[in-house]
Amino acid sequence: MNTLSPSILAADFCELGKQIKEAGDAGAEYLHIDVMDGLFVPSISYGVPVISSIRKSTDTFFDVHLMIERPRRYIREFAESGADLINFHLEAEDHVEETVEMIRKLGKKAGITIKPKTPVQAAAPYLELVDMVLVMTVEPGFGGQKLMPDCIEKVRQLRRMIRERGLETDIEVDGGITVDNVGLALEAGANVIVAGSAVFGGDVRDNVKRFLEKMR
Ligand code: DX5
Ligand code: ZN
């Protein structure tokens, strides 16, 4: 089963509630929420107050992508704000197992994320512990970039590793995914697809429907 996770980073924030509803009504099951701290990545986006606010308007599954230094400090706050899954970067946290455990104890799904230059081997020790590995397909920090083809190869390696261990860990891809290249990511073994500008740039419903057709 493949899942689409539209990233609200590319949404029109004056119309956020409306656009979230459009994406959900058109069949997107997740909502990808990018939290940036201006340290781990150059940009600052949004955080807990925005998540708490949109949580009141939808039952959609919140897939929260933390691009922040030492994410363990904020796990409780994000869990309480309404996240369903919390992804954090391996490059940003020294206490990976403790952080995963904390997310789990708060009743949420846990994911680890790797940047384009981080090899999949870095995720290998944690595959049994997490629900998801997020493989960045662009350098994190900005929407609207072009997909890095090398990262698709990483997805393939990771899926092989997961299969060999008899696991069913989700693989999410994030960055530069369009209706034209989503097939490559799926074929390599990704099953959760993030798309920001390709969903929120233009007609949200049409874009979601076009993605879902390619993802069947
Ligand atoms: C980038 C974020 C992405 C971003 C993707 O750092 O993690 O989720 O919103 O945007 P697109 O799909 O436009 O590349
Ligand atoms: Zn993201």
Image (cartoon, grey):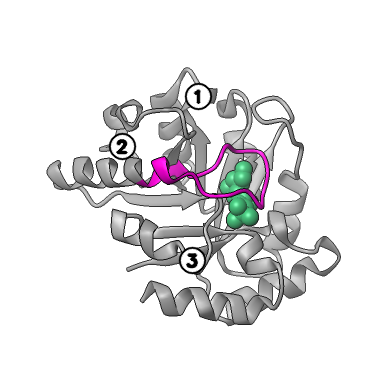
Quadrant placement of the N terminus = bottom left
Residue contact at pointers 1 and 3, CB within 8 angstroms:
no
Q: Residues within 10 Å of mark 2 (few under 14, many from 20)?
A: some
Residue 163 in the image, given as x and y percentages of width and height: 17, 48
Residue located beneath label 2 in the image: 129
Image height check: is 212 above or below 75? below
**Horizontal relation, residue 158 to residue 28: left or right:** left
Crowding around mark 1 (Cα neighbors within 10 Å: few <14, some 14 to 19, many 20+) is some
Number of other residues with Cα within 10 Å of mark 3, as a class: few under 14, some 14 to 19, many 20 or more: many
Relative to residue 184, is residue 214 depicted above or below? below
**Residue 185 on image: x %, y %:** 38, 56
Nearest to the eye among marks 3 and 2: give it.
3
Q: Is residue 199 magenta?
A: no
Determine the secondary structure under disc 2.
Answer: loop
Going by the numbered disc 3, the residue's amino acid type is Leu
* Spatial separation of the CA atoms under disc 1 and disc 3: 25 Å
Looking at marks 2 and 1 on the same chain, the residue that comes earlier in the sequence is marked by 1
Q: Provide the residue designation for mark 3.
A: 4
Q: With respect to residue 125, does 180 lie above or below?
A: below
Judged by its main secondary structure, the magenta piece is loop
Earlier in the chain: of badge 3 and badge 2, it is: 3
Callout 2 amino acid: Leu
Q: Is residue 137 magenta?
A: yes
Q: CA distance from mark 2 to mark 1?
A: 17 Å
Mark 2 or 1: in front is: 1
Q: Which residues are magenta?
A: 134-152
Q: Inspect the image, locate mark 1, and give the three-letter code of the amino acid beneath it.
A: Glu
